[in-house]
Amino acid sequence: MQLIDSHGRHINYLRLSVTDRCNLRCSYCMPADGVPKLSHGDMLSYEELFRVASESVALGIEKIRLTGGEPLVRRGIVQFIERLAAIPGLKELVLTTNGLLLAEMAQSLRSAGVKRLNISLDSLKPEVFASITRGGDLQKVLDGIAAAGDAGFPPVKINMVVMRGVNDDEVLDFAALTLDKSCTVRFIEYMPTIREDGWNSRSVPGSEILERIGSRYPLLPLVSTEMAGPARNFKISGAAGAIGIITPISGHFCDSCNRIRVTASGMVKGCLFSGEGVDLRQYLRSPDNTELRETLRRIVTGKPVRHHLADESVEQGSIAMSQIGG
Ligand code: SAM
Ligand code: SF4
């Protein structure tokens, strides 16, 4: 079955947030004093998350990304992944992590059925990394990336949020990682989700990132596949890995958006930046899945044509990405 929204887009991707908790406090994702945590009762149980996932797949979702908060901090995640991986019709089960717990968990995640890992890493300098993440230990993430390779994962995708004056001087260092490693480094425009003053001066347009890399290395464009997501992909000539540019601000990719999101508290959203969503918990109380499935279908049909995050004329609420899953 194919899920097509009212703007003709093929929706086949669910981002499923399994927790709002995190072992980091990245400055672009959360305010300094954190965000109010969901109580255990407000968080979907694994059983409920499983029902959401399997109904979504029955409707036509083919790829699920587990996210958070930090998905690896939720107890029992490996056993949950084993169940998800066995859902008939699910083609790709992938996970986004900050990598802090990967060194100890990579092998069990691989055995449980995670196909690929995206790792968020915004600096290769220990002190800058610690400052962005408000205390994180860079070495743990690097050990985690190495452990993913040892566990047999395909080369990881590293996501770097580029912020002017914070880490943009490291763009070339990140690009250089792809020269002899077959990883993909994806440069992401900083999104003003927590509405800090001066975000405009911090955001570095994808075109500028590309220009900087292109002025140092010869770049070749790569063709994207349907499941590959919103990145425009390139390769430094002769390099082992690839480079992606994700431009939610300067060139939103809403025309080709293929995803819906479910938060850890059970809100299903057709758009990351839409304040609207439907609380699935009311439908999860009944053992019958009809309403749940119909609501998921309705969210797909009603997906907005585009987001307005960067429009100064549109009033924006503040969102912590850790609450939605990025
Ligand atoms: N904790 C996991 C991690 O950091 O990979 C998963 C959740 S995190 C919310 C998902 C992604 O959202 C990360 O790659 C993070 O860099 C990205 N993100 C969070 N806030 C962002 C912002 N303001 N602009 C751009 N990307 C952001
Ligand atoms: Fe946590 Fe990921 Fe947000 Fe950083 S980006 S605070 S690791 S949820």
Image: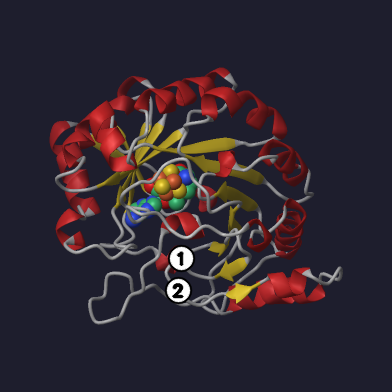
- Marks 2/1: CA–CA distance: 6 Å
The residue under label 1 is which amino acid type? Leu
Which sits in the foreground, 43 or 210? 43
Which sits in the foreground, 105 or 247? 105
On screen, residue 285 versus residue 239, left or right, reads right
Q: Quadrant of the N terminus?
A: bottom right
Image location (x, y in percent) of residue 212? 15, 41
Which sits in the foreground, 287 or 306? 287
Q: Residue at x 48, y 28 (%)?
A: 155
Q: Residue at x 41, y 60 (%)?
A: 320
Estimate how packed mark 1 is, as few (under 14), some (14 to 19) or many (20 or more) residues with alpha carbons within 10 Å. many
The residue under label 2 is which amino acid type? Ser
Whether residues under marks 2 and 1 lie with C-beta atoms below 8 angstroms apart, the answer is: yes
Image location (x, y in percent) of residue 40? 65, 56
Look at the picture and state if 300 lies above or below 138. Answer: below
Q: Which residue is mark 2?
A: 274
- Is residue 182 visible in this depiction of the protein? no
Image location (x, y in percent) of residue 53? 71, 57
Image location (x, y in percent) of residue 78? 69, 36
Estimate how packed mark 2 is, as few (under 14), some (14 to 19) or many (20 or more) residues with alpha carbons within 10 Å. some
In the orientation shown, which residue stands out farthest toward the right?
287
Q: Residue at x 53, y 62 (%)?
A: 258
On screen, residue 297 versus residue 183, left or right, reads right
Q: Which residue is mark 1?
A: 272
Look at the picture and state if 172 lies above or below 290. Answer: above
